[in-house]
Image (cartoon, rainbow, N blue to C red):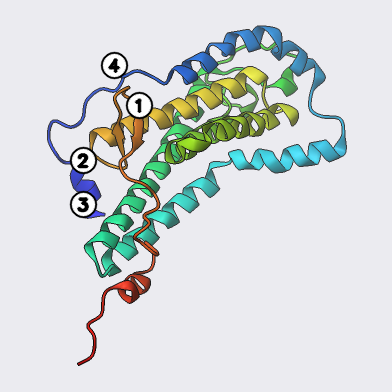
Amino acid sequence: MNAILARFQKPGRCRLLIQQKIDSHILALASLIPLVALVFDAASGAAGHLSDPILMALANTFTRFGECDWCLVVSLVLVLQASATCHLATTIRHRCQALFISSIGIYAFLTILLSGLSANLLKRAIGRARPHAFLDSSPLDFSPFAGSARFESFPSGHATTIGAFCMIAALLAPKYRLPFAITALWLGMTRVMVGAHYPSDVIAGLCFGAGFAWIMARLFARYGLVFRTDEHGSPVLRQKLQNREATSWHSPVAAASTAPRANPA
């Protein structure tokens, strides 16, 4: 843990990331926000939530994946377990592997936490009316800092968490980027199905969360943690999550059992 924190104390490492290029796929998706708002939001507000009770129950179940508490708990447990393993590891190789996993947990924790807080501040400042207020307000009615959840629709906080989580997963396992993107879209749209958000709220939340995770990955890459930047400026893992030579990064006992032993005389 001290080694990770020491990276952030090196002078000259912290620079503005606004000048860095954002993933073109995120920008392309973000361009859909005004289009979706103009074409689908009014119809979605008039339709309300799903009428079928079974589909509504399923939507209510899957929409809970957008709650950030479980993501924070899992990432924090990952950090604590990997940090403990780092202290108990019997070899430098296993200690470095545990430190790398701990850094991933810190990255995930900070990304989910800060993106969620930022989205909540934004939705309060924007003050867009939610769909259940459609009869009294149109999708383009705004009441900034109204102090009511009724005017905290844009962007969707759940969709922000989903977008951030799926971007984290895509960066860790780029081979499955497309499945993660499809999963993010379906989970995000459950907010529309339950009548909590307009479609544009969800698209905005997904883009915000994914973009936040991408920028955080660039920040960590600047400090030499978890990621590095490739020739295109995109963040990629500094090392593979699985090492064929390692039997178990989380088990110092297993590491000790695989160490070479001297033959008895």
Q: Which residue is drawn at 81% across and 19% down?
A: 47
- Report the number of numbered marks: 4
Look at mark 1 in the image and give the residue it sits on.
Answer: 234
Local secondary structure at mark 3: helix
Local secondary structure at mark 1: loop
Residue 19's disc number: 4
Amino acid of disc 1 = Ser
Does the image show residue 129?
Answer: no
Residue closest to the far right: 52
Q: Residues within 10 Å of mark 2 (few under 14, many from 20)?
A: some
Local secondary structure at mark 4: loop
Q: Locate residue 217: give its quadrant.
A: top left
- Tell me where residue 58 appears, x and y as whole percent: 77, 41
Q: Nearer the viewer, mark 4 or mark 2?
A: 4
Q: Are marks 1 and 4 in contact (CB under 8 Å)?
A: no
Q: Residue at x 60, y 17 (%)?
A: 128
Work out how far the residue at label 1 is from the one at label 2, CA to CA, in angstroms: 21 Å
Is 185 on the left or on the right of 8, as rendered? right
* Quarter in which the N terminus is drawn: bottom left
Q: How crowded is mark 4: few (under 14 residues within 10 Å), some or many (20 or more)?
A: few
Which residue is at the front of the view, 30 or 161?
A: 30
Residue 8's disc number: 2
Does the image show residue 89?
Answer: yes
Q: Along the polypeptide, which appears first: circle 3 or circle 4? A: 3
- Tell me where residue 115 appears, x and y as whole percent: 45, 32
Which residue is at the front of the view, 191 or 234?
A: 234
Q: Along the polypeptide, which appears first: circle 3 or circle 1? A: 3
Amino acid of disc 3 = Ala
- Tell me where residue 108 appears, x and y as whole percent: 42, 43
Residue 3's disc number: 3
* Quarter in which the C terminus is drawn: bottom left
Q: Along the polypeptide, which appears first: circle 3 or circle 2? A: 3
